[in-house]
Every structure is written in structure tokens, then in C-alpha cells.
Image (tube, grey):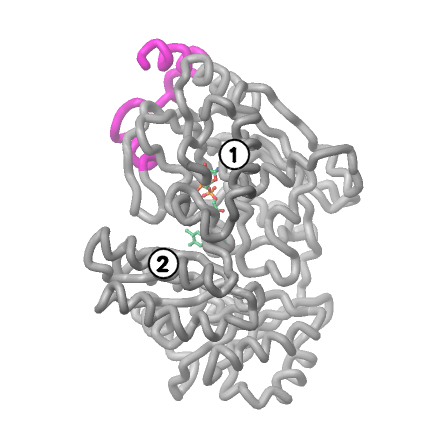
Amino acid sequence: VSGLLERLQAVLGPEHVLVDPDLRASYETDWTRRWTATASAVVRPADTSEVADVVRTCAAAGQPMVIRGGGTGLVNGSVPAAGEVVVSLERLRTLDAVDEVSAQITVGAGVTLAALQAQVRPLGLDFGVDFAARDSCTLGGMVATNAGGERVLRWGVTRTQVAGIEAVLADGTVISRLAGLPKDNTGYDLPGLLAGSEGTLAVITRLRLRLVPRLPARVVALLALESVAAAVDVVRRLRSLASLEAAELFLADGLTLVRRHTGSPAPFVATYPVFLLAECAARTDPSEELLELLEGAAEVADAVIASDAPGRSALWRYREAHTESINAEGVPVKLDVAVPLPRLAEAVDRLPGVVAAVAPGARTVLFGHVNEGNLHVNVLGAPDAAAEHAVEVAVLELVAGLDGSISAEHGVGRAKREFLRLSRGPAEIAAMQAIKSALDPNGMLNPGVLLP
Ligand SMILES: Cc1cc2nc3c(=O)[nH]c(=O)nc-3n(C[C@H](O)[C@H](O)[C@H](O)COP(=O)(O)OP(=O)(O)OC[C@H]3O[C@@H](n4cnc5c(N)ncnc54)[C@H](O)[C@@H]3O)c2cc1C
């Protein structure tokens, strides 16, 4: 390793090859605090050509690498497992000028979502994907995990926003396709393939991203309901509004936890079991069409509406503070599943029971993105590692039995790898293995992530 470190220092300068355990520490775990291991070193290349040099140098030495963005991924994809070199993209922070004619922008992989938003919003544009990790997560990480989030029902997942990619392959070769042509049927769609590849096929260094209009007139409604079935039915009708941008679900126990952690006041005088947060956005005020639709919805037991920015963020806080509030109570088992929408109510109904059967006394907190049938399943208080594993098995087998996905938006990482077979058949897994072997024959990039 020492010869390799010297070569990496020669490429990047000693200050960007971190070997001191204190300096490495934050790169050897992630936001979840569930996984930690030791890296041989952490390297911080500044641009595509330095990334290519690093990859070529490590590959020549047979040294595996783990690719790292903001470390906010939730499935153990960016944490070293056994002495890998961590390649951090944090210094690839170039934000080009917005191409307003095409409504596109080219960014470095290490740019955070919040920095992109700050760059494009003053021009009346926005990025179609948004979620609570925006201050830390990087665009490279979001594309590598094909992140979803709160606006998918309107604008689609991250892959949909990618118009071009530049990336370094496992042998150090650079592929670059950044013209951003909306029509370009010239063979395999490499940007589409790299989106969701979780750092197993290439290191993404730059991205050409589509932008969407930043719709200025917004209204948020927090609705109190008696059941998840009612929430699904309200969303079915809300979809008739072209302005609908988000439809998020949480439950009474999640609200209690959030209020304890944030000190937020109760949104309603009475208590209710189910809450639906809906946001509409348009060029002109969408409040009237939203209110008109809600007036006809008998399932809505109570509602709070806000159209000013502070009021809207106060309502969003009830939903967005779920992740941090759960983490403040302990290190949860985190699962991110999707079921066909007609089966969402059944899933919410059955999940706490299957958890309690294998981990009595554990607490199951559920919330998610209704329209995609996407539930975040967080289990607190499983007594030991065996119980945690039993919880994962019980939840994911239930979901697979409902024709669902064992990972809706967080990806597979190392955390969900053993369960991939519940969502993908042997032929599909063999095809994925063949792609991996073709692009990274020696398993240099993110070994053990996604595929066995
Ligand atoms: C509070 C919170 C809320 C969240 N909400 C959502 C949500 O609503 N929807 C959702 O989908 N996700 C959500 N996430 C998880 C989401 O996956 C990550 O926040 C984000 O997509 C990862 O970005 P990152 O830069 O932190 O990547 P990291 O965590 O550093 O890495 C994630 C994976 O991508 C790989 N990777 C990172 N950068 C690159 C690159 N440049 N090239 C190749 N591979 C790379 C890593 O090796 C790893 O496998 C949330 C996370 C948190 C903490």
C-alpha cells in the first residue's frame, strides 16, 4: 500500500491523500451511523482528469475503491468494507452557467443539491428532484442511486433529469456525453445505465442535467384522514390537478415523534391516525382548484392550508423531520419499499404485525411517498443484530409477496444485497453480473455493493 500512497500523493498532492485516522474517520461511516470500517486512504481528486489518474493508479495496483459523494446514502454504498481507497468527489464542485435556452446545466459530481437549487432558482428554473438531505447529498450520488424524493409524481426520478454524463471507467478511461441532446438514439444509453448503478460501473464526474420551471405560486395542504385507503383515494382524485407536485404520507406515531424532536405544535386540535401532505404549484395561484377538490372529498376529516413560504415550510417540517427525528431516538433498521398502489393500505396494515412477530417491543414508524406506493419502514428498538436481520427478512418478504420492490429509491448497496433475489429473478441478476464483468472485470469499483 505504501508505494501506492506515494503514487497517489504524487498525483493529487499530499494534502488530498488522507491517511491520518482522525482525518479519515468521517469518510469511514455515513449518515446512518450503522456501518463503519477502515479505509487504506481517502483521496480527494479535483477534476475528471485527476479522478482518471486515481482510478488508473489504483487499478494498476489491484487496489479496490469505494466511491463517495455526500455520504447521505442509506444502504451502505459509500462506506469502505475492507481497506478500500475512498475516492471522494467533494472537490468536483464546478457549476457552469445555466443554459437557459435548453433549460439545462452542466455540474461537477460533487455539487450539492442545495447549491444547484441556489444557482438555478433565481432564473425561474429548478431541479425536478428534491428531498431533505439537500444540503449534503451530491448530484453524483443522487444519479448513482437514482434518487426519488418528494416531487417524483410531477417530474420523475433522478434518471429522468439526466441529459448527459461524463464518467471514469474502472480502467481509468473517460467517457463523456455532455451535449444534452433530447433526441439521440445512437445505441446503448450509457447515462441511463449509470443512473442507479451505485458506483459499481464507473465514477461519475460531471453531469448535464435537465431543469424544470420553478413554479412561483404554491399551496400546501396537510389533511387529516381516518385511513390509508382514504389517503390513496384522495391522491387518486388530486392527480386530476395538473398542479399537483407532491403527496406525502405519515401516521400519528410519526407525528408524535417529530413533535417531540422539533417542538412543533400540534397541527390539529383532535388526533387522527393518518396524514396526507399535498403540494400544488403553478404559474398562478393553485389554491382555488385545490380547495374546490378538497371540498368534495368527504374522507378529509380536517385540513390546514398554507400558501405563504413560512407556513408551507412549517407544514413540510412535519413530514421532512421524520428521518432526523427517528434517528434522534436511536439507530433504526431502515427499509425503503414500494408496493403497487392498490395494495398500499394493506401493506401499512400488515407491516407492524410482521415486525412485532419477530421483534416484540420494537417500534415501527412508517411514512412515504403515496403516489409511488413507496413506504419508508423504520424499526426502532430491535434488541440485537439477529432481531434486526429478522425484521429485514420479515418486511422484505411481505413486500415481495405483495409484488413490491425491496428498494424503491435508496438502492441496494451492501445493506440490501442479500435481498436482491426477492425483487429480481436469476436471469436478470445474471444479466447485471455480465454488465458488471464487462465494465469492471477485476471488481475495482465498490466491491460488494449491489451484486454479490
Ligand atoms: C435526511 C435524508 C433524506 C433522504 N431522502 C431521500 C428521498 O426522499 N429519496 C431518495 O431517493 N433518497 C433519499 N435519501 C437517500 C439518498 O440516497 C441520498 O441522500 C443521495 O441520493 C445520495 O447522495 P450522496 O452524495 O450523499 O451519495 P453517497 O451516500 O456518498 O453515495 C451513495 C451511493 O452512490 C455512489 N456514488 C456517490 N457518488 C458517486 C459518483 N460520483 N459516481 C459514482 N458513484 C457514486 C456511492 O458509492 C454509493 O454507492 C435521503 C437521505 C437522508 C440522509
Residue 108 lies in quadrant: top right
Circle nearer the N terminus (2, 1): 2
| Residue at the extreme left of the image, as rendered | 383
Q: Secondary structure at mark 1?
A: helix
Residue that carries the numbered disc 2 in the rendered image: 324
Q: Residues within 10 Å of mark 1 (few under 14, many from 20)?
A: some
Q: Position of residue 330 (x, y in %)?
A: 26, 57
**Residue at the location (47% across, 33% down)?**
90
Q: Is residue 33 visible?
A: yes
Q: Position of residue 22 (x, y in %)?
A: 26, 30
Secondary structure of the magenta portion, mostly?
helix
Which residues are the magenta region?
1-28
**Residue at the location (43% across, 72% down)?**
348
Mark 1 close to ligand 1, CB under 8 Å:
no
Asked whether residue 125 is drawn in magenta, I would say no
Q: Secondary structure at mark 2?
A: helix
Amino acid type assigned to the residue bearing label 2 in the image: Glu
**Residue at the location (43% across, 17% down)?**
58
Q: Is residue 284 left or right of residue 319?
A: right
Asked whether residue 19 is drawn in magenta, I would say yes
Against 413, is 224 above or below?
A: below
Q: Is residue 265 left or right of residue 157?
A: left
**Residue at the location (48% across, 70% down)?**
249
In the picture, the disc for residue 433 is: 1
Q: Residues within 10 Å of mark 2 (few under 14, many from 20)?
A: few
